[in-house]
Amino acid sequence: MVRLIATDMDGTLLNSSHEISKENIEAIKAAQAKGITVAIATGRAFYEARTPVAPTGLKVPYICLNGAEVRDESFNIIHTSKLNHAQIKDITTILDKYNLYYQVYTNARIYTEDKQMDLDIYIDIANKMGHTPDVEKIRASINKRIEQGSLKEVQSYNEVYERDGELVLKFLAFSSDLEKLDQAKAELKAFKHLAVSASSRGNIEITHNDAQKGIALQALAESLKIDMNEVAAFGDNLNDVSMLERVGYSFGMENGVDEVKQIAKYRAGSNEESGVGRGIMQLLNGEIN
């Protein structure tokens, strides 16, 4: 019996238009109608995770920034795992050593030192996914995020690290040089106080070691008095592994990376085919046990 379901967003719950399909929405509502809690578990910050969910009317808990921030259905923050100055120094020393571009995520917004680099990265991501990037649409999206305040360009990240009341929660580094990216990732993994993962082949996500989707999902389950054998999770990439390894019902997306599909007990359809919604309905209909 499933009592809690967690789903990743990008490449999982969301389609390539970054929308939640009608089929996925209806399946989530069907699960909630049966008393099952459905949670979002994403590498996104809350202020960007909320954007595609808001039009659906769904009320769900949020595990954001790979577990660095957890919010309940009313958006109240119930847990935060921040990076301290020593950890920030360890991270930036490695990223700078390999000359990797990165963004800094805080509890307030995302910071970039070069919005043109952001544009180039999103174009590269689209190309790697086999899509034809709409450059003007991507540029407009970046400018909109800057106007809304969720993304801010700064001269130096040092001013962010010293800002009172602002917590550094995640670093997201990018490179098309995969060999260099892998070398940096290997060095970062040597720090036991850091969690190092990825949401695509061309990036590295770095958080506090306590900030992992699996740890946050387990804490959520415990707060609801739900055994992990009664939890299902859907994911497509490496930052989903920690939760897929812990749950009773793990689903790897058809479009996911091989490591995720090998770890998962079950296969869900692709994110373009409402794989999450169809997987949820299989659980509700008793087709998976």
Image (cartoon, rainbow, N blue to C red):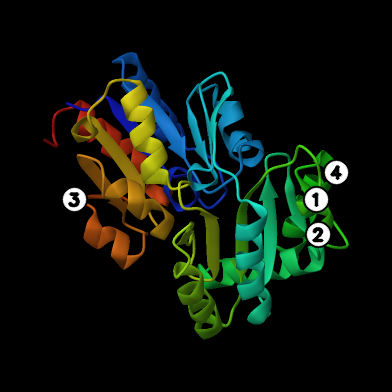
User: In the image, which is nearer the foreground, mark 1 or mark 3?
Assistant: 1
Please indicate, yes or no, whether residue 112 appears anywhere in the rendered image.
Answer: yes
Cα distance between the residues tagged 4 and 3: 43 Å
Q: Quadrant of the C terminus?
A: top left
Task: Name the one closer to the observer, 82 or 276.
Answer: 82
Q: What residue is disc 4 on?
A: 147
Question: Counting other residues with Cα less than 10 Å from the Cα at mark 3, is it few (<14), some (14-19), or many (20 or more)?
Answer: some
Disc 1 and disc 4 in contact, CB within 8 angstroms:
no
Cα distance between the residues tagged 1 and 3: 44 Å
Identify the amino acid type marked 3. Lys
Res 158 label: 2
Side of 119 relative to 258 (left or right): right
Residue 217 percent coordinates (x, y): 37, 36
Side of 42 relative to 161 (left or right): left
Q: What residue is disc 1 on?
A: 162
Residue 84 percent coordinates (x, y): 63, 51
Cα distance between the residues tagged 1 and 2: 7 Å
Residue at point 65% right, 73% down? 93
The answer to which of marks 2 and 4 sits earlier in the sequence is 4
Task: Name the one closer to the observer, 121 or 178.
Answer: 178
Residue furthest to the right: 155
Cα distance between the residues tagged 1 and 4: 23 Å
Identify the amino acid type marked 2. Asn
Tally of marks? 4
Q: What residue is disc 3 on?
A: 265
Identify the amino acid type marked 1. Glu
The answer to which of marks 2 and 3 sits earlier in the sequence is 2
Please indicate, yes or no, whether residue 132 appears anywhere in the rendered image.
Answer: no
- Image position of 49 with respect to 16: above or below: above
